Amino acid sequence: MKLKSSLLMLMLSMGIFAQDKSEFIYASLEAQHASELKASHPELIDIITTHNDVTIAHLHPEAAHELHQKILSHGPGYLMHPSKEAAINKIKNVKEQSRTVLQFTIDQQAFVRQVLDEVSQSNIEEVMLALEAFGTRYHTSVQANQSAEYVKQTWENIIALYGRENDVSVRLVNHNNTPMKSVVVTINGTQTPNEYVIIGGHLDSTVGGWDKSFAPGSDDDASGIATITEALRVLLANNFQPNRTVEIMAYAAEEIGLVGSNEIATSYRNQNKNVVAFVQFDMTNFKGSSQDVYLATDSFINNALNLYLIELMEEYNSSGHHQFTYGTTRCNYGCSDHYSWAVNNFPAAFPFEASFDDSNMNIHTSYDTFELIGDASHSVKFAKLAIEFLVETAKHTGTLSASNISSSKNQFYLNHKTLGFELASVQKITSASILNVAGQKVMSRFHLNSKDQLDLNSLSQGGYILILETQDGQKITHKFVLK
Ligand SMILES: [Zn+2]
């Protein structure tokens, strides 16, 4: 890393980039980083316009990448756009993320609990090792498209194994700004096929600088591709048939400005496809922090979707053998492919392997190998979260939702700043907690009755989640919005 940075500095001081702008790209990046780059290397960046702290610039991609490696914790730190007009259009049209809590529900407990047991750590390891064995998946390398063919074949094998050729298909996606292809698998929705529930990760790898010969990219992001592949396998092995259409995507060229995901998300926007939620899996196998799953909370993350992921983890992962913990962290502008969906005004979220300060230091080096981590036990938690998210958001056709049976009998009402509830079964509540959209606990009460109420006067406007823990260890969750 150090060597490459000093090589870059040498080239900069020699003025190698100074005259030639043919390699320059249009990009959006954080305004502060754009002005820092302008101050240190004015020949590498032309600032075009700034809107809501996001700058559109014409810049040299390698230099921007190296600069962001130093300042930022993850990803390219910018989105590449095909033209100046496209960049301006995209950035000015980003709507304020809605604070309204969407009608995401949890009622597929029987199916989800049945399938979670089947997540296989060794399957995840197998895919990670196969991707690493390409040597590099840098987007312009021959191996990049070989790895795309491998993912396509792996997904087709899963479809064939479970006899789903009729309603599940895989396609390669060609791009304009990279020779690398993305891979997309589609499970057709049975009830509302024009509503899409999507998860993704990126297939390319990089070591930055000019030496593209060896970029194993095991954690970044073979781990994410292996995680979503195992989610697909478990769902098809259990004859999952979603009401909404489910898609799983392996993106080309994330590392050079989220190119594959941005082209796909933009085309979905242009085709008026209704993407109800997108969740990104980029780096899932390095446990660097005390908690397990860290939800990114930057301004491009959809708060309702984040609350829903918290609710899912409270429901399925707070006890028993699928138990793991969660926290929240902040990620920089353009840190991964979920930004491509967010800038196209689709709800997006990003659960990450650690707090960003504690994430894998070996990424973008030749040391990002499976061997250095040794097993895929951390990724298993993310595969479970992916399955919970896909089943509960897309809904398994034909299952009787649990809410029709029991939880709908739990009554909740919000009256000004009082939240009342009455549970279907009479039992003591040992604790009541309220979390905000950043996952922080903002209120705790102990020893309540099955019919009781909470005074919310200390809380400001926004979305929240109430978690009631009953005497017999059951957890009941309820989302609400204070206006
Ligand atoms: Zn990555």
Image (tube, helix red, strand yellow):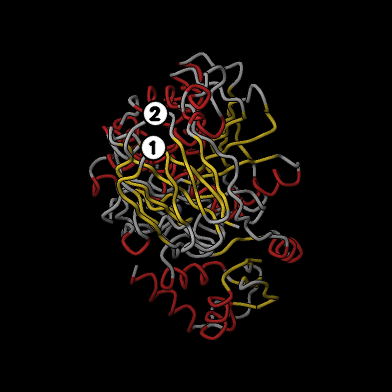
**SS label for mark 2:** loop
Name the residue that disc number 2 marks.
Answer: 425
Badge 1 vs badge 2, beta-carbon distance below 8 Å: yes
Above or below, 330 against 134 in this view is below
Judged left or right of residue 359, residue 391 is right
**In which quarter of the view is residue 330 placed?**
bottom left
Amino acid type of disc 2?
Ser
User: Under 8 Å from ligand 1: the CB of mark 1?
Assistant: no
Q: Position of residue 337 (x, y in %)?
A: 54, 52
Residue 381 coordinates in the image, percent (x, y):
34, 39
Instruction: Reply above or below: 282 against 299.
Output: above
Q: Is residue 206 left or right of residue 292?
A: right
Q: Residue at x 27, y 39 (%)?
A: 377
Which quadrant of the rendered structure holds the C terminus?
bottom right
Label 2 packing within 10 angstroms: few (<14), some (14-19), many (20+): few
Work out how far the residue at label 1 is from the one at label 2, CA to CA, in angstroms.
Answer: 7 Å
Bin the neighbour count of mark 1 within 10 Å (Cα to Cα): few under 14, some 14-19, many 20 and up.
Answer: some
Indicate the amino acid at tag 1.
Ser
| Image location of residue 186, percent across then percent down | 59, 29
Whether residue 226 is visible here, answered yes or no, is: no
Quarter containing the N terminus = bottom left
The residue wearing badge 1 is 450
- Disc 2 residue lies near ligand 1 with CB under 8 A: no
Q: Which mark is residue 110?
A: none
Residue at horizontal 42 percent and vertical 22 percent from the top: 110
Could you tell me if residue 26 is visible in this image?
yes
Residue drawn 62% across the image and 57% down it: 97
Instruction: Give whichever of 323, 148 is nearer the camera.
Output: 323
Of label 1 and label 2, which has the lower sequence position? 2
Coordinates of residue 275 in the picture (x, y in percent) = 64, 41
Instruction: Give the image quarter of residue 288.
Output: bottom left
